[in-house]
Amino acid sequence: AVASGATVAVAAADVTDAAALGAAVDGLAASVAPVDVLVTSAGYAHPGRFVDLDAAVFRDQMEVDYFGTLHAVRAVVPAMVERRRGHLVLVSSTVAFVGIYGYSAYAPAKHAVRGLAETLRPELKPYGVTVACAYPPDTETPGFDRENAHKPDVTRRISGGIAPRPAAAVAKAIATGIERDRLVITADPTTAALARTAGLLRPVLHPYLDRHLPTD
């Protein structure tokens, strides 16, 4: 939803092209207003068995999901530091807490996003710039539909018991997390539990997930 009287402006850019993305951000800042809040929601997942995926898939996942995030952050942080205010929300994924069969290309990129967020938090805090990391679960989007077209059967069985969240619900959770200045933002009970206990639960989680593995 857009607030009454709000100005909405749109600029398209390839997040893997740092120069193009920076130019888009600068153009919006000049024509509308400086960026106060950045949410790095551009990304996608290409699931598949490790042995079946082409090397180019691994590289592209990092280029879009991690470097796309990095380029966006680098485009806005200098001005935020200069103004001594701003908020970054780096969008990671539930798979940043637990490795799931079929996401050997996607999960490392989302782990990298988590690491970037946790490292930037103390670096930018003295300048009044706060950092959060959002960990959405499966979410009802066109991208999720495309992801499902590539999922191995094992991955489908693991995720099939949990319904994807509506995109509006995930967006609301992120907005609430910004308002409450949370470092960790989740949008479903499963991810919230993993965020608190993933390290402790790993001895239990791995046997549970392994039940879905093929036997041949």
Image (tube, rainbow, N blue to C red):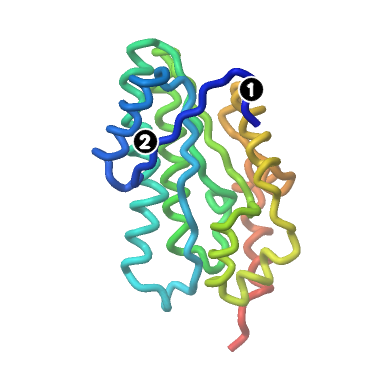
Specify few, some or many for label 1: CA neighbours under 10 Å numbering under 14, 14-19, or 20 or more: few
Mark number, residue 92: none
The answer to whether 165 is drawn above or below residue 159 in the figure is above
Q: Could you tell me which quadrant the C terminus lies in?
A: bottom right
162 or 146, nearer to the observer: 146
Q: The disc labelled 1 sits on which kind of residue?
A: Ala
Q: Is residue 129 left or right of residue 216?
A: left
* Percent position of residue 55, x then y: 32, 69
Q: Residue at coordinates 63% horizontally, 37% vertically from top-left?
A: 171
| Front tag of 1 and 2 | 1
Residues tagged 1 and 2 counted as in contact (Cβ below 8 A): no
Tell me which corner region of the image, top left, top right, bottom left or bottom right, holds residue 211. Answer: bottom right
75 or 124, nearer to the observer: 75
Residue sticking out furthest to the front: 5
Q: Could you tell me which quadrant the N terminus lies in?
A: top right
* Percent position of residue 194, x then y: 65, 46
Specify few, some or many for label 2: CA neighbours under 10 Å numbering under 14, 14-19, or 20 or more: many
* Percent position of residue 38, x then y: 46, 29
CA gap, disc 1 and disc 2: 25 Å
Q: Residue at coordinates 63% horizontally, 21% vertically from top-left?
A: 179
What SS does tag 1 mark?
Answer: loop
Q: Which residue is mark 1?
A: 3
Q: Is residue 161 left or right of residue 58?
A: right
Mark number, residue 72: 2
194 or 69, nearer to the observer: 69
* Percent position of residue 32, x then y: 41, 20
Q: Earlier in the sequence, mark 1 or mark 2?
A: 1
Q: The disc labelled 2 sits on which kind of residue?
A: Ala
Q: Residue at coordinates 27% horizontally, 40% vertically from top-left?
A: 20
Q: Residue at coordinates 37% horizontally, 10% vertically from top-left?
A: 83
Q: Is residue 211 left or right of residue 135?
A: right
